[in-house]
């Protein structure tokens, strides 16, 4: 079949993957009719824009869909969902393309690329922001910070808003205000039948409950409305690090700090080798360090008291703690996760930071053969623990830490298989400290259904029932999938 490509030429594509895993031929007339009906672009592999539209953050995942549609609005999304359903196509949805498992794409499938939809509207009086699904975190933070407002949205500014939110979402503000979905007020979503629905606590409540943590399974969310809070525009934070030989005292301090520190203070503990960055003294490049990523969003007059335990450690290798804008702090870790590198993580939730967990993290860092890997302890305890277990399917209300091993290496790394195996082996040693739950956005492509079930625990059966109601054919399956209750879409 042919279509007019965005470069003005023609391209031929004869087969597209179906939801059942086979291939189908869609007629030239059907594709041309769809292309003419939408206002956005329809791309095929020969179009020059295709490579950008299908490039993912995790370079380990290489997939090439047969068709990519780039909507200009909700009407295009409706047409795309209907086209995919009517032709039984393997459908995927791309927001920021930052998911580690590469769920934004399906080989030979049909992708809805939302990246062109990046509008943000802030209502400072109502303390609310509505953002389209193609936004990155930086798009939302930039606009809300004009009014000294923010909502919990991760800690890497190039992450896609939609993917982060639909899986629950956590960041530096989670201790104060909960999961990202705890601050979600409303969504507009196109469900598998092509209908445009509003979902909130008062409208389509069951769908709203499911979207808050498992949203990838229930439709294409086209816009999100969040509650905003007074944050910034000036905060205090950055990175600080000490020699790995001081890990015992650094981790002791971290335990005390996370037990007693104010909610305005969030600290992530990172054990790794120092990168060859300009801010790291050359003699420390490649040496093991204990680093803290710090964000303090309280009264700046109180920052010395809040950070006193950190300062009392003294003699850091690197000290970049300072007053800065909230948007700057939100992008502080971007350079540590460059697009195109290979990423392989295994993480869990912990309800407490025990001596044994700290010592295991320390031992694994000492043994780790991966130069770019890091052992992570991220403190999230606070507001999320105070909500009902049934407040959104995100659950995991007993989680106070996200912890695990985050592997990263160059695309041409010859030891990739060995590195992946080391991460899996390290994970086995870390799992005994888990609550039993885990963060769905950190699941990798090789995680099985058991990991998905563990994410939602007792909520899983209810999620399957809601799936059967809104997507009985499992049109939205290119994700960490929840199949319909009756199994018809499996």
Image (cartoon, rainbow, N blue to C red):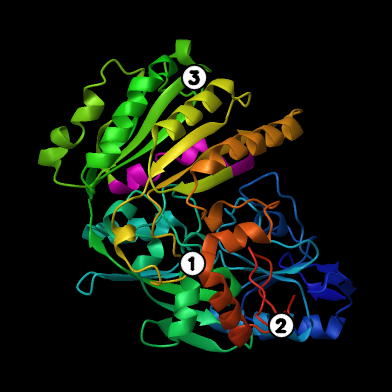
Bounds of the magenta span? 326-345
Tag 1 and tag 2, C-beta contact below 8 Å? no
Could you tell me how far apart the alpha carbons at marks 1 and 2 are, in whole angstroms?
A: 21 Å
Going from N to C along the chain, the mark reached first, 1 or 2, is 1
- Crowdedness of circle 3 by 10 Å Cα count: few (<14), some, many (20+)? many
Task: Work out whether 468 lies above or below 70.
Answer: below
Image-based side of 339 in relation to 251, left or right:
right
Residue visible at 61% across and 50% down in the picture: 100
Tag 3 and tag 2, C-beta contact below 8 Å? no
Tag 3 and tag 1, C-beta contact below 8 Å? no
**What is the x, y in percent for residue 215?**
53, 71
Instruction: Determine which residue is flagged by label 3.
Output: 288
Image-based side of 21 in relation to 250, left or right:
right
Q: Quadrant of residue 482?
A: bottom right
Instruction: Determine which residue is flagged by label 2.
Output: 473
**What is the x, y in percent for residue 77?**
60, 79
Going from N to C along the chain, the mark reached first, 3 or 2, is 3
């Amino acid at each position: 079949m042919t279509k007019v490509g965005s470069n003005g030429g023609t391209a031929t594509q004869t087969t597209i993957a179906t939801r059942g895993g086979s291939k189908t031929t869609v007629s030239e007339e059907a594709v041309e009719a769809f292309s003419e009906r939408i206002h956005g672009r329809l791309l095929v592999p020969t179009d020059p824009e295709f490579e950008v539209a299908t490039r993912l953050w995790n370079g380990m995942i290489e997939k090439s869909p047969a068709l990519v549609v780039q909507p200009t609005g909700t009407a295009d999304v409706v047409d795309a969902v209907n086209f995919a359903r009517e032709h039984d196509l393997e459908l995927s949805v791309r927001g920021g393309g930052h998911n580690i498992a590469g769920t934004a794409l399906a080989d030979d499938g049909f992708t809805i690329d939302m990246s062109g939809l990046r509008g943000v509207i802030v209502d400072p009086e109502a303390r609310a922001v509505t953002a389209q699904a193609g936004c990155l975190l930086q798009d939302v933070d930039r606009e809300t910070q004009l009014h000294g407002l923010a909502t919990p949205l991760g800690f890497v500014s190039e992450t896609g808003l939609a993917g982060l939110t639909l899986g629950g979402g956590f960041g530096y503000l989670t201790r104060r205000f909960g999961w990202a979905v705890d601050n979600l007020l409303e969504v507009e979503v196109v469900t598998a039948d092509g209908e445009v629905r509003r979902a909130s606590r008062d409208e389509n409540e069951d769908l709203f409950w499911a979207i808050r943590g498992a949203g990838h399974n229930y439709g294409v969310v086209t816009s999100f409305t969040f509650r905003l809070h007074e944050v910034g525009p000036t905060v205090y934070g950055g990175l600080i690090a000490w020699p790995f030989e001081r890990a015992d005292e650094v981790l002791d301090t971290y335990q005390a700090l996370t037990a007693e520190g104010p909610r305005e203070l969030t600290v992530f503990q990172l054990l790794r080798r120092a990168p060859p960055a300009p801010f790291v003294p050359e003699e420390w490049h490649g040496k093991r360090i204990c680093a803290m990523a710090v964000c303090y969003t309280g009264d700046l007059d109180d920052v010395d008291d809040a950070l006193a335990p950190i300062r009392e450690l003294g003699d850091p290798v690197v000290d970049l703690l300072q007053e800065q804008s909230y948007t700057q702090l939100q992008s502080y870790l971007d350079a540590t996760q460059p697009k195109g590198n290979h990423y392989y993580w295994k993480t869990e939730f912990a309800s407490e930071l025990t001596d044994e967990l700290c010592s295991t993290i320390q031992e694994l860092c000492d043994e780790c053969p991966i130069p770019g890997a890091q052992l992570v302890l991220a403190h999230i305890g606070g507001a999320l623990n105070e909500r009902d277990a049934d407040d959104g399917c995100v659950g995991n209300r007993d989680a106070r830490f996200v912890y695990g091993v985050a592997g990263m290496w160059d695309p041409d790394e010859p030891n990739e298989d060995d590195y992946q195996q080391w991460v899996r082996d390290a994970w086995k040693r870390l799992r005994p400290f888990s609550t039993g739950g885990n963060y769905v956005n950190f699941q990798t492509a090789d995680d099985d259904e058991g990991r998905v079930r563990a994410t939602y625990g007792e909520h899983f059966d209810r999620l399957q029932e809601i799936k059967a109601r809104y997507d009985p054919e499992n049109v939205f399956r290119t994700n960490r999938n929840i199949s319909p209750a009756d199994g018809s879409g499996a």
